Amino acid sequence: MLWTIAIILGALWLLGFVSSYTMGGLIHVLLVIAIIVVLINVIQGRRAA
């Protein structure tokens, strides 16, 4: 589910980046949050294993 959210946010970021810059700030913030969450998940997964 986490990967699905990250992919959706990435797609929305690309769409916003290509189409217009009005929501660009919000989409960039969401993309950064998604990347941080994925990194935390990967780090915790490696530490637990």
Image (spheres, rainbow, N blue to C red):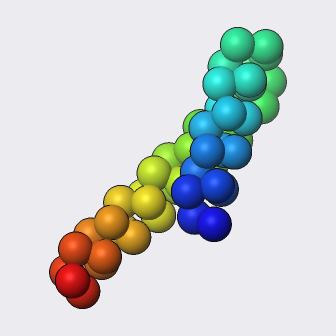
- Residue in the foreground of this view, choosing between 8 and 24: 8
Say which residue appears at 47% left-offset and 64% top-offset. 37
- Compared with 12, 45 (above or below) is below
Say which residue appears at 45% left-offset and 51% top-offset. 35
Whether residue 29 is visible = no
Say which residue appears at 57% left-offset and 64% top-offset. 2
- 3 sits to left or right of 38: right
**What quarter of the picture does the N terminus occupy?**
bottom right
Say which residue appears at 44% left-offset and 60% top-offset. 38
- Residue in the foreground of this view, choosing between 25 and 48: 48
Location of residue 46 (image quadrant): bottom left
Location of residue 8 (image quadrant): top right
Location of residue 23 (image quadrant): top right
Whether residue 21 is visible = yes
- 39 sits to left or right of 49: right
- Compared with 22, 40 (above or below) is below
In x, y percent, where is residue 16?
A: 74, 24
In x, y percent, where is residue 21?
A: 74, 19
Give the farthest residue toward the bottom: 48
Count all numbered tags in the image, as a single digit.
0
**What quarter of the picture does the C terminus occupy?**
bottom left
In x, y percent, where is residue 22?
A: 80, 24
In x, y percent, where is residue 4?
A: 64, 55
Give the farthest residue toward the front: 49
- Compared with 6, 39 (above or below) is below
